[in-house]
Image: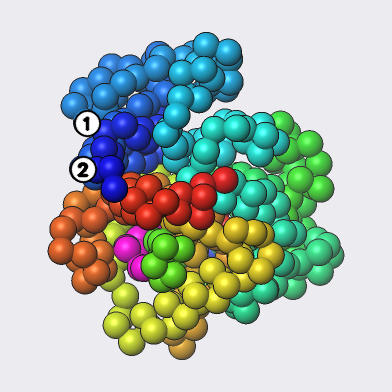
Amino acid sequence: MPRLNIKKHTICTLGSHCALQVLKGAKDEGFKTLLICKKTRQNLYQRFSFIDEIILVNEFNEMFNTTIKKIISRENLYIIPHGTLISDIKLSTLEKLQIPIFGNKHILKWESDRKLKQRLMEEAKLSTPKEIKNKKQIKNLSIVKLHGAAGGKGYFLAWNEKSFNIRCKKLIEKKIIKSEDDLYIQEYSVGVPVYFHFFYSPLKNDVELLGIDRRYESDIDGLGRIPATIQQNINLDPTYNVIGNSPLVLRESLLYDAYSMSERFVAATSRLVKPGIPGPFCLEGVYDNNGNFTVFEFSSRIVAGTNLFIDGSPYSTLLFNIPMSMGRRIARELKLGIKKNRLSELLT
Ligand code: AMP
């Protein structure tokens, strides 16, 4: 059998979100690395010696221009999708793309469409917050979300129709939305937020928990710094814009259920969105005071919270004897796929 020369294989991503983690992990596993980078960020990314090659663009969608497309269409090149790829490139363009993408690109549509997302979570028998179809039905504390909004920006709380109308009007005035049809209302789940970073390996047929984080969101996480008596006197409308992430470890007794949720999710994806969910995904929700988890979101690709664990997490340490980031785990699965001639199970 010919010896595997992993240097002939390239891992490529866009310069943003978790690109440093992904390309560092790729280099640690022996791959060549390529970054598509906006000219304005060149000064940042050229500092890192694990990036072998940088292609400069003005906007990320230039990656489909003939010259750049030709470079990235080279043999043995794999694109790792992350939040920026999804927000900056149309899903329909990604669907048609001939260049291999790690993971299941068809599931990205299920992540961005709230109806499909709900269907998948129900198929996985995850407990989810109740959807409120009409503002007149708002009876309890509810969270109002923008469709496809990145990271909680513009979300607000409402507890009846009047409070909904006041905040909705503000968003329309600021031209953030066109009408209230652009909003999605969900029951607010009381508890503490937890974000699980899972990796599903089709080659090992196993789910791994590689880390857990919680998000630090402005202004909601800053409210505790303002005494309640003062909060009442100022017109403060907290929103949920993600600013950063902190690491978290869970009570060990909660881990069993966390793993079974992830296994049900993997099984549901393989039934509804072939070929399922090879690679990273995140289940996002809150634990209530009985230790029950309500899932309000999933991400079907690597999340930025994994950047906390470039050097591994308490959970990855239990599974691997070397520091294993999510980026490195992706590269390792690709390497195994190449060795075993099973790449087709990892790419779409
Ligand atoms: P998402 O875009 O759904 O990830 O939500 C952004 C943030 O809003 C989350 O990180 C939570 O802090 C908060 N959030 C979203 N949905 C709910 C919910 N149903 N109950 C409580 N908090 C929520």
The residue carrying mark 1 is 50
Q: Where in the figure is residue 238, as x and y percent of width and height? A: 52, 51
The percent coordinates of residue 330 (x first, y second) are 36, 50
> Residue visible at 53% across and 59% down?
277
Element type at mark 2: helix
> Which residue in the protein does label 2 denote?
28
Q: Nearer the viewer, residue 83 or 137?
A: 83
Residue 124 location in percent, x, y?
A: 61, 74
Q: Are marks 2 and 1 in contact (CB under 8 Å)?
A: yes
- Label 1 residue near ligand 1, CB within 8 Å: no
Magenta region includes residue 212: yes
For marks 2 and 1, the one nearer the N-term is: 2
Instruction: Specify the amino acid type for callout 2.
Output: Asp
Of residue 95 and residue 74, the one placed in the foreground of this image is: 74
Provide the major secondary structure of the magenta segment: strand
Q: Determine whether, in the image, residue 77 is placed left or right of residue 66.
A: left
Dot 1 alpha-carbon crowd within 10 angstroms: few under 14, some 14 to 19, many 20 or more = some
Residue that appears at 18% across and 56% down: 323
Q: Nearer the viewer, residue 251 or 323?
A: 323
| Image quadrant assignment for residue 250 | bottom left
- Please determine whether, in this image, residue 189 is positioned above or below residue 149: below
Q: Residue furthest left?
A: 321
The magenta stretch is 208-216
Ligand 1 placement by image quarter: bottom right
- In the rendered structure, the answer to whether residue 207 lies left or right of residue 23 reads right
